[in-house]
Structure formats: C-alpha cells, structure tokens
Amino acid sequence: MTLNNLKELLVVACAGSTILLAQEKSLTIEEAISLGIANSKSLHSSLMKAEYADAKAGEISAALYPTLKLQASYLKLSDVPEFIIPLPGSPVSFPVVLNNYHARLSLQQPLFTGWKLQGAANGAEFQAHAARSDVAKDKAELIYNVKLAYWGLYRVREFKLQADENVSLVAAHVEDIENLRNQGMATNNEVLKVKVQLSNAKILQSDAQNSVQLAMISLNSLIGIPLATNVTISSSLSPLVNEFPHLDRLVQAAFLQRPDVQGMEWRVRASDATVVSARGGWLPQLFLTSNYYYARPNQRIFPAKDEFRDTWDVGLSLQFDLWNNLTTFHQTSAAEAQFRQTNDALASLKDGITLEVTQSYLSVRQTGEKIKLAELGVEQAGENYRATQEKFKLGLTTNSELLDAEVMLLQSKLQLTQAQVDYELAQAKLIKAIGDGK
C-alpha cells in the first residue's frame, strides 16, 4: 500500500468516526420534548392553520370598517359637430371635448347591517380562538407521544440490561454444572438442561437488542433527529408514587384546562355568532356613501368646459331583500342546526373526558400498587436465588430448582421495570387527560 493510499484510508476512517460520534446523543425527557416540539411537522401544520384562521378573521372583520376606493379613466372621443343653440343676436355654442379625464374617490361605511357583518366577524374570531386551542391540543398530544416513546426506549434498554445479566448468570451456572459433572455429581442431561436455558437466555437477549433498535428509531423519528442516532437515556424514573387530588376535582380541572374543551367552547360561540349573522338577512342594511369627483370635463358642470373641476356627493344607501326565494330562511335554519350540533359535540366530548380521566386515574393507582408488589417480588426472588445457589453448590438442591430460581429472578426484575414504566406513562396520560400541560 502506498503512502498516499494510507493517507486516504486515514482520512476516510477519521470522517467515518466523526459521523459515528455525531450520531451519539444523550437526552433527558425535557430535551426530547423540546426537540419534538421544535421539529414536529404536524405541530407546524397546526400552527399554520391557526395563522390562517387569524388572517381570515381579520379579513372578515375588515368589512365592518370604511372602504375607500379610487377609480381613474381616460377616454378619447371621436370628433362630432359642435352643438349650437341659435338664440337671436347671441347664439350659444357647446364645444366638443375630445379628451375626457375622470377620477373618483369613493367612501362607504356600513351603518346598520342587522348584525350580519358583526356576527360573521365574531364567528371568524371565535374560530381563530378554536384553532389556537387546537394547537395546544396537538402540542399536548405530541408531548405525551414523546414521553411514550422515551420511556418505551428506557424500558427496552432496562430489559436488555436484565437479559445481559441473566445470560451471565446462566453462563456461570453452565460452568458450575459442568464442574459437578466432571466430579461425577451431575449428569449429562442436567448439563444439557442448563445449556438449553442459556440458549433461551441468549435468544431473549437478542430480542431485547432488536427491541432497543426499534424503540430508538421510533423516538428519533418522533423528535425529528436522524434515525441512526444512538440516543442515551439521561432521565431516570422517580421512585416515588405521587398523590393526585380526588377524581371529581380532576374531572372538573379537565373541563377547565383541556384545550380541546376550550376549542369546542369557542366553536359553540362561533356557531351562535353564525346564527346571529344569518338572522341579519331578515333586516335592512344601511350604508353611508360619499364620492369625490375630479374630471375634465366634469359632467355635473354645464356647459362642459375643457378643464379640470371637482365635485362631491354624500348620501345614504338602503338595501332590503323583499324576496330571495327563502334563502335567508334556509341559511338561518342551517346555522341553528349547526349550533345545536356543536353543543351536542361539546357534551359528548365532556362525557368522553370524564371516562378518560377516570380510567387514567384508576390506572395510576393500580400501577402504583404494582410497583410496591414488584419491589417485594424482586427482593424475595433475589433472596430465593441466593439461597438456592448456595444449596446447589453444597449439593442440597437440584439443578431444576436453581434454574427455576434464575427464571423467577429475571421475571421479577422485568415485572418491576414494567411496573415503573407503566406508572410513569399512566401519570403522563393522566396529566394529558386533565390538560395540565406538563
């Protein structure tokens, strides 16, 4: 290999190591949530919907205020004979102006529209509030999903560590049983049983490693970082079981705090405003109008002169639909039906929230109890394994009993990890259910 080839190989190796180092990332749960919020395309889409609703509300509200329009035109006319009035002694002639210039500045202000415009403006504003509540709802869902993925990765990593420990225990058991066989104190069948147990432990270890990779990819995708990033879990589960207020207080808190309830309440108000706007079609509409004219020649000035002159006018305009084929009736009926439907949706949402909070509350209590039982199980299984192992070394117990003790110890540790993660996720779900926003 030439010196240049060696240099190229070193450069590639250094670049590869840099990429691998860049793929290492240690994250706390708070950092994972921040990344998820910053990189979420669905949350950004929700924000854009809210911005659209705000802009639409501004557009509709603009109809309440004066409008000012400027129009200008130029017209070239064909030549015609001059118009003359043949008065005795002094005929009057009207010159022909071939170049016509015209400019008009118009002002219109709604004075009364039967609350049609005001209702439409209020409805659009309430819909904008609802859209912002949807952003908060989507953010809460994202935070919960990040917690779910983060602690899911923590769980499978713990399973992997326990699977590794179990492989080490069973491997030591294989060594012990082979020594006993060499001394004539164990049969080949007993050695095979332990080796089968070791094979099963390695399969479990391989499954755990695969689960770690899948959980990591899922978390990376959710928080918007490269899928190949090797994430290290920096946060740890709290050993304490928290106390929550009584269920009735949690339900009431959910009704007050949850963004989906707030959004639906805004939609109820928007539907009510739509009813008001639709009913405005039964009433007359009154507008203030004003125009300023600057023209050459000005048609209001007689006789016409080839010079710029200005004039103006101010007036009131009344509009009233005497017959529109029941359009207003149908619009009002549709708006009222929509209002009742939105109220029903709000009531159904609150029923669902009551059920969700109740289920989450009971789940928190149950998983809290499971942690206590699982901790006791680990303690008992550990003591049982130590006692059985000592007896086995002294030849006071069978190989099968030691295998059972090893399996029981592994299962108890897995159950404790599962209970701890289940409790953390149950808390996260309850927090989301009551709209705490944490």
Image (cartoon, rainbow, N blue to C red):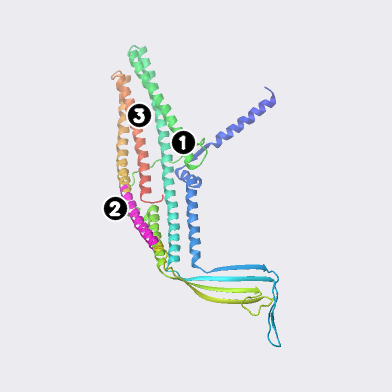
- Dot 1, how many residues are within 10 Å of its Cα: few (below 14), some (14-19), or many (20+)? many
Q: CA distance from mark 2 to mark 3?
A: 40 Å
| Residue beneath the point at 50% across and 58% down | 55
Q: Secondary structure at mark 1?
A: helix
**Nearer-N-terminus badge (1/2):** 1
Q: Is residue 167 visible?
A: no
What is the quadrant of residue 80 in the picture?
bottom right
Q: Nearer the viewer, mark 1 or mark 3?
A: 1
List the residue tagged with mark 1.
216
Q: Residues within 10 Å of mark 2 (few under 14, many from 20)?
A: few
Looking at the image, do the residues carrying marks 1 and 3 touch, with CB atoms under 8 Å apart? no
Amino acid type shown at disc 3:
Leu
Assess whether residue 337 is covered by the magenta stretch: yes
**Majority secondary structure in the magenta region:** helix
Q: Residue at x 70, y 86 (%)?
A: 90
User: Which quadrant does the N terminus fall into?
Assistant: top right
What is the x, y in percent for residue 131?
A: 44, 54
- The residue segment tinted magenta is 329-355
> Residue 9 or 105: which is nearer the viewer?
105
- Hey, what amino acid is under mark 1? Met
Please give the label number shown on residue 248.
2
Kindly report the distance in space between the C-alpha atoms of the residues bearing marks 1 and 2.
Answer: 38 Å
Q: Residue at x 43, y 59 (%)?
A: 126
| Magenta stretch encompasses residue 175 | no
In this image, 51 relative to 383: left or right?
A: right
Residue 303 position, x and y percent, is 65, 80
In the drawing, what numbered circle is on residue 19?
Answer: none
- Say which element carries label 2: helix
Check if mark 1's residue and mark 2's residue have beta carbons within 8 Å: no
